[in-house]
């Protein structure tokens, strides 16, 4: 029997065995990966694309502590450099296609390989739905950071004293009302919100309610107007707040989701399946970098505890409830 870290019977962990797969290299995944590198967890960090997630398209980030006015790609570069410094790396272009829970472990199937980790952190974010599907418009990204926004809480403060139009979640029109001079909302209200925020409530609260086909976004250097059913409506900002959880793989695997398709977690970021944790946008609102980074950190610490708990149990230790995660 050896003595390690104050516990008899525990040896330094065998880091040759795969302990964890982190699925998704956005803010939540990077945070988890940096912690896991520092904690010597043997993990793989997979991303369906090049890594970075939604921060790649954030023009200017004003609300992440310690870095004022940083551009999204710069923040991701800093995350990548930090991870590299602590010995980690992203395996890019390796999407996870299936997750299975089998007797004695987990199976993670990517486009390249099947892995058998002891734990998984799901950090796959969400899908931002643009104007293409509903209105056939394809140029909204030309105005990203120049009037078009996908994030009310992030960019709303930049539109103080200005006129904005909201599309999607009608609650965002109310949030914007606190931050901006004048808000219009382009209905119809999506069905899932209709019973809580019907048209009458919007109109009764000094938000201009519009309905019609959004035909164009106009403006030379930045957004100046939108065209709805042929009418040009001057606006400084357009907030598009339509989201999709994109958690089909995880639902199939048996993870419990809420009514909007987001993964249900507890305060340790644990899902309903032992050894599976989730962090970031995929666990629901608020959709923010700080929240994603925080949840990634919590999930990685929970995994560290989970792995240690498994090892202690294998050695025949009776664990207290606080280790039952
Ligand atoms: C334009 C814009 C501006 C924003 N500005 C701000 C801001 O100023 N401040 C702020 O706090 N928040 C902002 N946000 C929100 C913020 O970007 C998100 O809350 C945060 O980045 C979410 O991080 P995440 O890691 O949960 O998910 P994501 O960033 O979405 O990362 C998920 C990653 O998982 C990968 N993935 C998905 N499926 C799979 C799979 N099956 N296998 C492997 N990999 C997979 C994706 O490729 C992606 O890289 C903004 C969002 C947008 C769209």
Image (cartoon, rainbow, N blue to C red):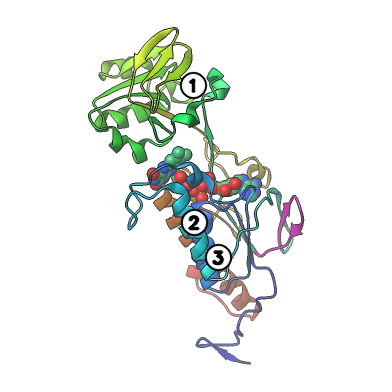
Q: Position of residue 71 (x, y in %)?
A: 41, 47
Q: Which residue is mark 2?
A: 77
Tally the marks. Answer: 3
Q: Position of residue 271 (x, y in %)?
A: 55, 53
Q: Which residue is mark 3?
A: 303
Q: Which residue is mark 1?
A: 191
Q: Position of residue 32 (x, y in %)?
A: 52, 61
The stretch of residues the image draws in magenta is 105-118
Specify whether 152 is left or right of 80: left
Q: Marks 1 and 2: CB-CB under 8 Å?
A: no
Residue 190 vs residue 101, the one in the foreground: 190
Neighbours of disc 1 within 10 Å: few (<14), some (14-19), many (20+): few
Give the residue at x 47% y 17%: 216
Q: Earlier in the sequence, mark 2 or mark 3?
A: 2
Q: Earlier in the sequence, mark 1 or mark 2?
A: 2
Give the residue at x 61% y 50%: 50
Instruction: Assign the N terminus to one quadrant of the image.
Output: bottom right
Q: Foreground mark, 2 or 3?
A: 2
* Quarter of the view holding residue 312: bottom right
Residue 111 covered by magenta stretch: yes
Residue at the farthest right position: 113
Q: Earlier in the sequence, mark 3 or mark 1?
A: 1
Specify whether 239 is left or right of 158: right
Q: Position of residue 15 (x, y in %)?
A: 65, 76
Residue 209 covered by magenta stretch: no
Distance between the alpha carbons at the discs numbered 3 and 1:
38 Å
Describe the element under mark 2 as helix, strand or loop.
helix
Describe the element under mark 3 as helix, strand or loop.
helix
Mark linked to residue 324: none
Neighbours of disc 2 within 10 Å: few (<14), some (14-19), many (20+): few
């Amino acid at each position: 029997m050896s003595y390690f870290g104050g516990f008899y019977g525990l040896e330094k962990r065998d880091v040759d065995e795969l302990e964890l797969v982190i699925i998704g290299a956005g803010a939540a995944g990077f945070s988890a990966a940096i912690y896991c590198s520092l904690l010597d967890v043997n993990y793989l960090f997979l991303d369906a694309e090049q890594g970075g997630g939604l921060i790649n398209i954030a023009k200017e980030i004003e609300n992440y502590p310690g870095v004022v006015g940083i551009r999204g790609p710069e923040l991701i570069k800093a995350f990548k450099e930090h991870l590299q410094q602590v010995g980690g790396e992203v395996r890019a272009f390796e999407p996870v296609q299936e997750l299975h829970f089998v007797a004695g472990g987990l199976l993670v199937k990517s486009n390249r390989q099947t892995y058998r980790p002891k734990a998984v952190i799901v950090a796959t974010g969400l899908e931002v739905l643009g104007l293409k599907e509903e209105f056939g418009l394809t140029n909204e990204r030309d105005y990203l950071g120049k009037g078009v926004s996908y994030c009310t809480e992030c960019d709303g403060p930049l539109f103080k004293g200005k006129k904005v139009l909201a599309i999607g979640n009608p609650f965002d029109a109310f949030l914007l009302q606190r931050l901006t001079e004048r808000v219009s909302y382009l209905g119809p209200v999506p069905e899932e919100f209709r019973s809580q925020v019907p048209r009458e409530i919007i109109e009764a609260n000094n938000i201009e309610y519009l309905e019609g086909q959004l035909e164009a976004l106009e403006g030379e250097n930045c957004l100046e107007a939108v065209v709805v059913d042929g009418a040009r409506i001057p606006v400084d900002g357009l907030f598009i707040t339509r989201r999709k959880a994109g958690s089909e793989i995880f639902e199939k695997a048996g993870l419990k989701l809420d009514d909007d398709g987001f993964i249900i977690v507890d305060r340790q970021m644990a899902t309903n399946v032992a050894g599976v944790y989730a962090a970031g946008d995929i666990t629901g609102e608020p959709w923010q970098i700080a929240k994603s980074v925080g949840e990634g950190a919590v999930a990685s610490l929970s995994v560290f505890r989970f792995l240690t708990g498994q090892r202690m149990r294998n050695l025949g230790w009776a664990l207290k409830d606080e280790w039952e995660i």
